[in-house]
Amino acid sequence: MDRVNIMVSERPVVIFSKSSCILSYTIKSLFSNFGSPLPLIFFPGSATGVNPTIYELDEIVGGGDIEHALAVLGHRTLPIVYIGGELVGGANEIMSLQLKRDLKQLLIRAGALWV
């Protein structure tokens, strides 16, 4: 659990994900394209969007241990998103914040997005 706390405190936006998870892909795409009028695939190398730290738990050494620690903390489904060192939630919570137009302010306060 200490490892998870260190990981989420080092960066403004941290996503725990699995490379094969479609909900994780959706959330990673949302953050990568955030603030851009068109998806970044149209602007290769573009610096727009949020640059989250992504931990693909099925690809990193110790990913299973991290997933277990997250489960002990009560987070059993992926993706798991932390913003500003605080748990925001999973895909449902992130999409809800986006639909309510609250996600942008949360990202600005965390220093992950500049306007």
Image (cartoon, rainbow, N blue to C red):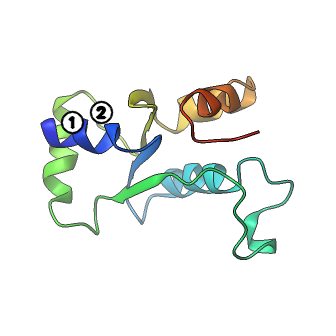
Report the residue marked by disc 2.
Answer: 75
Tell me the SS state at disc 2: loop
Residue 9 badge: none
At a point 38% along the width and 31% down the height, the residue shown is 85
Q: Which residue is mark 1?
A: 71
Specify whether residue 79 is in view: no
In the image, taking residue 95 as reference, residue 74 lies left or right, namely left
**Residue type (three-letter) at the residue carrying disc 1:** Ala
Left or right: 4, with 114 as reference point = left
Between 22 and 8, the residue placed more toward the observer is 8
- Marks 1/2: CA–CA distance: 5 Å
Estimate how packed mark 2 is, as few (under 14), some (14 to 19) or many (20 or more) residues with alpha carbons within 10 Å: some
| Residue at the outermost bottom position | 44
- In the depicted structure, whether residue 47 falls above or below residue 65: below
The residue closer to the viewer here, 71 or 4, is: 4
Q: Are marks 1 and 2 in contact (CB under 8 Å)?
A: yes
Find residue 38 and report its horizontal and vertical position in percent: 84, 60
Considering the numbered disc 1 on the image, is that residue within a helix, a strand or a loop?
helix
| Image quarter (top left, top right, bottom left or bottom right) of the N terminus | top left
Spot occupied by residue 54 in the image (x, y as percentages of width and height):
42, 56
**Can you say which quadrant of the picture contains the C terminus?**
top right
> Which residue sits at x=14%, y=36%?
2
Above or below 55: residue 45: below
Residue at left offset 69%, top offset 74%: 45
Q: In the rendered structure, which amino acid carries the disc numbered 2? A: His
